[in-house]
């Protein structure tokens, strides 16, 4: 099978990591793969930050949980199991991953969500090809509104946090293949 297709079909979210650090060279290669994703009007306006400091990741997990709980309360969303996890001091939204890549859009991008999503997809597929596991962490979204997080990561004004991708070496190997339904093709005209 084609290696690209094999990575697409085999990629799974990983939520358990070994303590082995991911080298800066590997992370730089992943960011390069993300930056080479298709992007609207060839804007090339995504920016990245990397956090591998365990103390900072713990701090950001705590802040991210509080911000997500606040979002849920303000939106009137009630998901008891999620609220239980977010209120648990030991629950780590980054699942003990040794590194997180944060993806930001620059001001004035018309296709910011699309560009960041394509970059995140490239990063996750490239990571899988290098033997690394990844997972997109939606619970970290509130950090994009946290002044301390933005300052720590040197995020310029007007830039928006679009994606948070954890990565590392899977603790127990890669999860098995999930059973997928065949895609529904609505028409061929």
Image: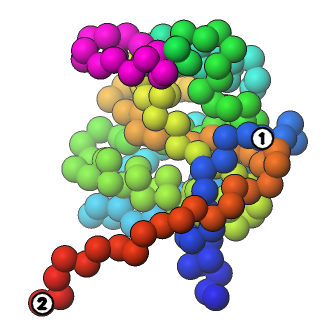
For image coordinates 57% across by 71% down, the residue present is: 9
> What is the quadrant of residue 185 in the picture?
bottom left
Q: Earlier in the sequence, mark 2 or mark 1?
A: 1
- In-front residue for pair 55/81: 81
Q: How many marks?
A: 2
Q: Are marks 2 and 1 in contact (CB under 8 Å)?
A: no
Location of residue 10 in the rendering, given as x and y in whole percent from the top left corner: 63, 68
Indicate whether 107 appears above or below 185.
above
Q: Is residue 35 magenta?
A: no
For image coordinates 58% across by 45% down, the residue present is: 135
> Label 1: which residue?
17
SS type, badge 2: loop
Which span is picked out in magenta? 68-83
Q: Left or right of 170: which side holds 175?
A: left
Any part of residue 102 in sight: yes
Q: Left or right of 17: which side holds 116?
A: left
Q: Which mark is residue 189?
A: 2
SS type, badge 1: loop
- In-front residue for pair 91/98: 91
Q: Residue lying furthest right in this view?
A: 20
The residues bearing labels 2 and 1 have C-alpha atoms spaced at a distance of: 46 Å
Indicate whether 58 appears above or below 87.
below
Location of residue 16 in the rendering, given as x and y in whole percent from the top left corner: 74, 40
Q: Left or right of 189: which side holds 145?
A: right
> What is the quadrant of residue 5 in the picture?
bottom right
Could you tell me which quadrant the N terminus lies in?
bottom right
Q: Is residue 76 magenta?
A: yes
Location of residue 112 in the rendering, given as x and y in whole percent from the top left corner: 31, 47
Q: Main secondary structure of the magenta part?
A: helix
């Amino acid at each position: 099978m084609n290696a690209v297709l094999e990575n697409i079909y085999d990629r799974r979210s990983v939520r358990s990591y070994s303590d082995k650090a991911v080298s800066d060279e590997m992370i730089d290669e992943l960011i390069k793969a993300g930056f080479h994703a298709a992007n609207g009007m060839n804007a090339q306006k995504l920016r990245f930050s990397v956090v591998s400091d365990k103390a900072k990741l713990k701090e950001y997990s705590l802040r991210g949980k509080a911000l997500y709980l606040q979002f849920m309360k303000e939106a009137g969303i009630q998901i008891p199991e999620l609220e239980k996890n977010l209120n648990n001091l030991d629950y780590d939204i980054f699942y003990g991953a040794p590194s997180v890549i944060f993806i930001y859009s620059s001001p004035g991008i018309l296709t910011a969500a699309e560009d960041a999503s394509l970059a995140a997809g490239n990063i996750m597929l490239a990571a899988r090809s290098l033997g690394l596991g990844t997972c997109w962490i939606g619970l970290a979204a509130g950090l994009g509104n946290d002044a301390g997080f933005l300052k720590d990561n040197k995020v310029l004004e007007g830039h928006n946090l679009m994606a948070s991708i954890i990565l590392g070496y899977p603790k127990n190997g890669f999860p098995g293949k999930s059973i997928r339904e065949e895609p529904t093709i609505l028409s061929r005209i």
